[in-house]
Image: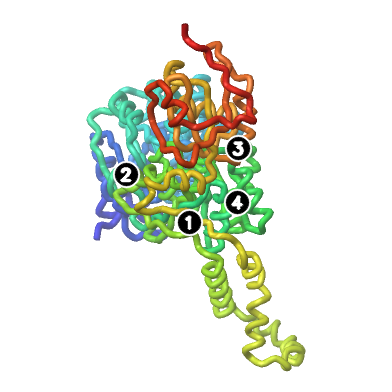
Amino acid sequence: MVSFKDLGIDSNLIKAVEELGFVNPMPIQTEVIPVMLKDQPQDIIALAQTGTGKTAAFGLPIIHKTDSKKRNVQYLIISPTRELCLQIADDLRDYSVNSKNISIAAVFGGSSMERQIDKLKRGAQIVSATPGRLYDLIRRNVIDLTDVKAVILDEADEMLNMGFKEDLEAILEATPKQRNTYMFSATMPDQLLKIANKYMHKPIEITVGKKNTGAENVKHISYFVQARDRYLALKRIVDYHPDIYGIIFCRTRQETKEVAEKLLQDGYNAEALHGDLSQQQREVVMNKFRIRHTTLLVATDVAARGLDVENLSHIINYNLPDELEIYTHRSGRTGRAGKHGTSIIIANLKEKNKIRLIENMLNKKFQNLPIPSGKEICEKQLFHLIDRVEKVEVDQTNVEAFLPQIIKKLEWMDRTELIQRFVSIEFNRFLDYYKNLPELNVPSGKNERGNRDSIRKANGYTRFFINLGSRDGLQPAAVIGMIKDYSRVKSIDIGEIEIMKNFSFFEADGNYTNEILSGFNMQVVNGREINVEVAERKKSEGRSKSFNGGSRKKRRFDKIDRNKKPVRRKRKN
């Protein structure tokens, strides 16, 4: 077994990590530390998931190599969020507790720039920074980078996802050409590869696990429901896991707020984390979550970036991310440090292909399960209650004084009736709630192709006509963009899109029919007024993806709801 001493780090650092409870280095540390400790170190691209020990992997060797006699910045660590920036700085201070004259500064947005500048002027050899604030300091000429030996990019892919590409390139341009660059990332998208090719010199690649894969200890589960039943499914999933402590990921800020508010109204310990919160509000939410006063954190991907919370039991994808690689980041927040976790997707049938793509990316199979029934949930909650009773610590001193009165009050009941009444106090609410609730699962099987119309109906889709087609340059992506922009519902579920020559059809969540119709009203494209109407398919008609003219138009395609405004079409001369 490799020890920290075998890696060649300073004895003061070994003492510090042992005091922190670390016995043996993790795989990423074993691979990275010896390379960074070389007299002529090489650039490194390290691919590893969040929670694999990356901070110590780069933190220990840079502290080891820092010249404590010099007060200028020697190492830059850049990370995507304030939380991660502060966490890195705190961890490095813990590692350097026995190393004399090592100063570490954290610079980030949302805090006093003047205090941060003062800290830099007093001397800091290692700076942990967010890209935006560091770039501001460079532009103001208040940070001296002439002695920088290396730049560390932590969670580099997330920084690109957050739009920091230009800031990162400007920072790298401002550092000495002969400096080393160490890039740590969970995934390697093309944009990141371009930065590596431009700013790194013959980097060696170190991969812990497989590229673009999730943590090995994470179980992946998918549930298929109707689009309109997504929240009801979420409640059942949460109720089925009484000890759940996790993050629920939503696509938009608005959806995050709505889901968190519904959960609170329904009695769950939930909080929302999104971009509209002030830094102070964000810290309050996170503190409550870390001490488990809040057990469900409802968040957007951007708001949750850089969070480091231990022992998460579940990640729930209320919606799949637009970029499938982000699923790796989400699921990697559980199952850390040898513990097991579960990543859940709540999906509808049109997202099956996306799940297959994620399976291929992770090289893992999802377990597709039915939504837990009311009976199953009640059973799970009942035995959870019994477990709590069995394991509760009894304060004999304080309870004993009340026992004679309690025994006298309850002595008329036999043992079985007493247990039944005791259990019912907390259990009745689940029994009452789930007694007559409907089934939420949707059909998913071999006859899927032949039953598409019934599946679309089950998923709550409405079919719409639009008076634009391929002749107008219409593409499916443009249709999706218009639906979301004009309806102002960014998280709307969109089904099949059929582009014809002069007109088209699309399917969307029927719960937003009014928003779609009113949103498209009076909109103009290329000088042409858009007309969108609800369409319905004749029961006896099949589906076609193309139209070749003639009388087939009337036979093969959807009739328009004639209660709506008629479509005006110009005939070619």
- Tag 3's secondary structure? helix
> Which disc is residue 361 wearing?
2
Residue 90, compared with residue 240, is above or below; it is above
- Tag 1's secondary structure? strand
Residues marked 1 and 2 touching at CB (< 8 Å): no
The answer to whether residue 336 is visible is: no
Q: Pointer 3: residues within 10 angstroms few (<14), some, or many (20+)?
A: some
Residue 89 on image: x %, y %: 47, 42
The residue labelled by disc 1 is 314
The residue labelled by disc 3 is 512
Q: How is the image coloured?
A: rainbow
Q: Earlier in the sequence, mark 3 or mark 2?
A: 2
Q: Earlier in the sequence, mark 4 or mark 2?
A: 4
Q: Nearer the viewer, residue 384 or 564?
A: 564
Residue in view at x 66 percent, y 57 percent: 266
Q: Pointer 4: residues within 10 angstroms few (<14), some, or many (20+)?
A: few
- Of tags 4 and 1, the one toward the viewer is 1
Q: Earlier in the sequence, mark 4 or mark 1?
A: 4
Amino acid type, residue under disc 2 in the picture = Met
Q: Earlier in the sequence, mark 3 or mark 4?
A: 4
The residue labelled by disc 4 is 287
Residue 127 on image: x %, y %: 45, 35
Q: Earlier in the sequence, mark 1 or mark 2?
A: 1
Amino acid type, residue under disc 1 in the picture = His
Measured in 3D between alpha carbons, the distance from the residue under mark 3 to the one under mark 2, in whole angstroms, is 33 Å
